[in-house]
């Protein structure tokens, strides 16, 4: 039986009283300012739904199929010009994702154009296509940050991603580290079959020279909903978070938790740099490969969560007038109606909300806090 550490490090240096005061301030800001005046900070562009892997957790159901509605390169360029005309792009980070974005033949043409317009951009990739030449071109094209998905050691990574490409992925990381990027990060989805590899992954990634490792727990969404055996138990969730807490600043590689979920007073600010707030529709918007405007790409592709489409709508109008479901307290119902933690979590991450039952599919009350 796994046991929690007797003493937990206090990385924030903050007392529970101060944390609660900060969380109350953040809640007031969210309710009275941010929802009324959203601030676009992260703009995700899903370049393609094509992928050379077939991950067991993929929320976008990506794979190797024909895309009939995919935006052309010229349509994406026109969208970027529109965003530059309507927003202060110095305050916006373009987050380029997929599928596997590098499968687009015109990827570098589009991103070179984004750089010419003045956008800052980062990439999420599986790393398998990042040769030395590609890494150099990414740097030349203005990429600042990159996150590469590595979901375990060789056997578990390839099982989870259903593709025999672990060696290519690790070589891709090495090729990126050879370039002077601002930030090269590995992201790992922790699930029931790789959780006991965390210590060895920490050693392998540190030895590679990686300086940022982001861990996220597998979520009940996408393909993972069909494989509940991969979801973490209460003890395993605690194991992951306490591992991050122990390792966060233990060596040259920072270990952090992803953006999901309110973690309670004890864990907030201890395993990531910020307090929880779901960014969907208030800080974050996305455009799918087919041009739909949505909030977070991890949310289910439901008609009521599509705010517009680039082929018929101007994004500025959509951002200012739509996304209303993310700017209200509609989730204060059912299990959440009388919860004393609702002020801080506001229903938790939108991607783990059950829009049919109107209740959270995942809540850490009773796991991390009472």
Image (cartoon, grey):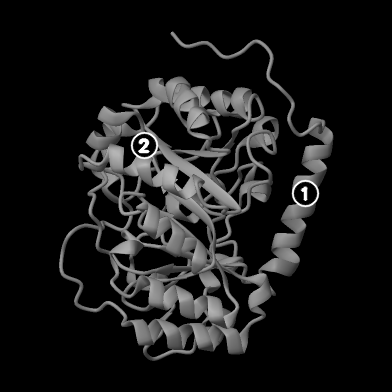
Q: Which mark is residue 24?
A: 1
**Image location of residue 153, percent across then percent down:** 34, 28
Q: Quadrant of residue 340?
A: top right
Front in this rendered view, residue 220 or 61: 61
What residue sits right under mark 2 in the picture? 151
Q: Quadrant of residue 299?
A: bottom left
Image quadrant occupied by the N terminus? top left
Mark 1, residues whose alpha carbon is within 10 Å: few (<14), some, or many (≥20)?
Answer: some
Question: What's the distance in space between the residues labelled 1 and 2, CA to CA?
Answer: 36 Å
Q: Locate residue 88 relative to residue 150 in the image: left or right.
A: right
Front in this rendered view, residue 132 or 337: 132
Front in this rendered view, residue 149 or 30: 149
Task: Tell me the element at label 1.
Answer: helix
Q: Quadrant of residue 115?
A: bottom right
Residue visible at 31% across and 76% down? 290
Task: Tell me the element at label 2.
Answer: loop
Q: Is residue 17 above or below residue 87?
A: above
Image quadrant occupied by the C terminus? top right
Q: Is residue 204 above or below residue 291?
A: above
**Image location of residue 30, percent across then percent down:** 70, 61
Q: Which mark is residue 250?
A: none
Sequence order check, earlier mark of 1 and 2: 1
Residue visible at 33% across and 75% down? 106
Q: Are marks 1 and 2 in contact (CB under 8 Å)?
A: no
Residue visible at 24% across and 50% down? 53
Residue visible at 73% across and 30% down? 11
Q: Locate residue 328 relative to residue 51 in the image: left or right.
A: right
Q: Is residue 299 visible?
A: no
């Amino acid at each position: 039986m796994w046991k929690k550490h007797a003493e937990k490090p206090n990385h924030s240096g903050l007392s529970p009283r101060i944390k609660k005061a900060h969380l109350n301030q953040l809640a007031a800001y969210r309710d009275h300012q941010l929802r009324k005046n959203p601030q676009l900070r992260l703009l995700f562009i899903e370049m393609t739904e094509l992928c050379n892997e077939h991950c067991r957790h993929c929320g976008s159901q990506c794979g190797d199929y024909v895309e009939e509605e995919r935006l052309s390169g010229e349509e994406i360029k026109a969208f970027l010009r529109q965003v530059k005309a309507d927003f202060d792009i110095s305050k916006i980070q373009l987050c380029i994702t997929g599928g596997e974005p590098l499968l687009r033949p015109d990827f570098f043409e589009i991103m070179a154009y984004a750089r010419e317009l003045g956008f800052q951009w980062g990439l999420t990739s599986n790393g398998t296509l990042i040769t030395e030449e590609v890494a150099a071109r990414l740097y030349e094209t203005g990429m600042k940050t990159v996150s590469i998905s590595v979901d375990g050691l060789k056997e578990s990574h390839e099982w989870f991603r259903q593709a025999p490409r672990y060696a290519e992925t690790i070589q891709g990381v090495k090729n990126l580290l050879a370039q002077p990027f601002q930030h090269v990060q590995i992201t790992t989805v922790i699930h029931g079959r790789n959780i006991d590899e965390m210590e060895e992954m920490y050693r392998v990634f540190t030895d590679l020279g990686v300086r940022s490792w982001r861990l996220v727990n597998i979520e009940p969404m996408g393909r993972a909903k069909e494989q509940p055996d991969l979801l973490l138990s209460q003890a395993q969730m605690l194991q992951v978070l306490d591992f991050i807490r122990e390792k966060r600043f233990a060596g040259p590689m920072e270990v952090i938790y992803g953006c999901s979920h309110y973690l309670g007073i004890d864990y907030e600010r201890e395993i990531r740099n910020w307090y929880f707030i779901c960014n969907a529709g208030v800080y974050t918007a996305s455009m799918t490969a087919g041009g739909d405007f949505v909030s977070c790409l991890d949310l289910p592709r439901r008609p009521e969560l599509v705010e517009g489409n680039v082929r018929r709508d101007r994004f500025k109008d959509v951002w200012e007038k739509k996304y209303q479901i993310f700017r209200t307290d509609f989730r204060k119902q059912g299990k959440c109606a009388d919860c004393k933690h609702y002020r801080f979590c506001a229903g938790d991450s939108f991607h783990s909300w059950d829009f049919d039952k109107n209740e959270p599919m995942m809540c850490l009350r009773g796991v991390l806090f009472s």
